[in-house]
Image: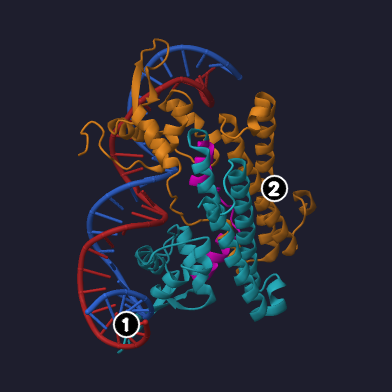
Chain colours: A cyan, B orange, C red, D blue
Amino acid sequence: MNDPMVPSTSTSTLGYALLGLLARRDLSGYDLAAQMKRSVGYFWQARHSQIYPELAKLEAAGLVRHLLIHQTDRPDKKIYAVTDAGRAALISWLTSPIAEAGTRDELVLRAYLIWLADPLQAATLFRDQQRHHAARQAEYEAILVALETTHGPALRRPGSIPFASYAALRRGIGYEREYAEWCGWLAEALGGATSAEDLE
Amino acid sequence: MNDPMVPSTSTSTLGYALLGLLARRDLSGYDLAAQMKRSVGYFWQARHSQIYPELAKLEAAGLVRHLLIHQTDRPDKKIYAVTDAGRAALISWLTSPIAEAGTRDELVLRAYLIWLADPLQAATLFRDQQRHHAARQAEYEAILVALETTHGPALRRPGSIPFASYAALRRGIGYEREYAEWCGWLAEALGGATSAEDLE
DNA sequence: GAATACATGTAATGCGTTACATGATTTA
DNA sequence: TAAATCATGTAACGCATTACATGTATTC
């Protein structure tokens, strides 16, 4: 019953992430690796060493195809595009039931074991993390401002491409805000200084 | 310079999680696996197939030792205890600089690609997730109430063992609250029904 | 008679990171 | 001349899940 040209191989989440990026526009493996350092990279990452083999798998499964671009001044490159089958697989996956993966957070683990540590040293750790997450939050908020100025009202229109970015961004901002707040509360409770300067 | 009895092997995060549980009280591998389904399991998980080899590694590194308990009605078991070296390694790790691991969240990835999906189907997915995270939040809040009744004011005293549980729990509650809120906002924006009953 | 609790392991497989490998062009 | 950018791959290794493997005692 299976078409030998389109074997029903189960695609990994990374595969869908790549298909999703390619659904916006055609890209090379190198471009995809660059995208994975920003935008999508905030909630799904992969190195080029994982991306190239994954693209080969997607191509073998008939979900993408590539066009070889010959270049003289630079190395040749392969521009990948989503096939009809790839687009269908992606759309089907998007609303399929989600398998919950357990959370792994090393900082929360440390909080759970904090009774073993020196309170002031621990406070410094959590104060540092508070600053880190607050900085990340500010970074996301700057991206939001940029999105607002370039897309205007389309940003708030569900169904539009910018709205999808906006939705993901909103989660990022909320996540970092809540994380920073918790770190601040804990550092405070442990009696830590408010800023690094106070320790000098 | 290295003591051959205590080789400086780098312990994994799981190793520290196990050391942390054993610092509270001596436990068997089976007990540790059970603990990993609740308490710590909310922010760090491992199956028994990963725990048994890890305990062997910790023992080879001199961080834990075990006592074999012979039982007639049940299988024999090994009760593990933290050594002085293990306790020292754990305390040192607790406040050591933390290497930030990138976040991987499949639901946020799907949100980023939502423009490809049918809005109403997508709304159902996010409404389901909202319910899931709200339920998880309620579960954590119930544990908090239980902790409050059993430990009383000690729960709010930084440095106490219950306070560490309380701190981790607070993060869990905040995380789920913010996550559920975001899911609800997105489902609403996509024009989804408020409850499953509205769909019938 | 079936499932669950107790108890401890190993093997196969998949996902992800780091390191290895090559090589031209452009910028500091 | 050192580095970053462009461009594509492979190999080794570690962490995590699923499945394989065994066996008794209790509970439904």
**Looking at the rendering, in which quadrant would you find the N terminus of chain A?**
bottom left
Give me the residue at 27% from left, 40% from top: B8
Residue tagged 2: B131
Drawn side of residue A171 relative to residue D10, left or right: right
Q: Is residue A189 above or below residue D26?
A: below
Q: Main secondary structure of the magenta part?
A: helix
Residue B13: give x, y in percent of width and height.
41, 42
Towards the viewer: B147 or B189: B147
Drawn side of residue A123 relative to residue A81, left or right: right
Range shown magenta: A85-114
Q: Disc 1 and disc 2: Cα gap in Å?
A: 49 Å
Drawn side of residue D28 relative to residue A51, left or right: right
The amino acid pointed to by label 2 is Arg
Q: Where, by quadrant of the figure, is residue B17 drawn? A: top left
Give me the residue at 64% from left, 53% from top: A178
Q: Spot the residue most to the top.
A: B72
Q: Is residue A159 above or below residue B181?
A: below
Residue tagged 1: A76
| Chain to which the residue tagged by mark 2 belongs | B
The numbered dot on residue B53 is none
Residue A90 highlighted magenta (yes or no): yes
Residue B85: give x, y in percent of width and height.
34, 31
**Is the residue marked by circle 2 packed among few (<14), some (14-19), or many (20+) residues within 10 Å?**
some
Q: Secondary structure at mark 1?
A: loop
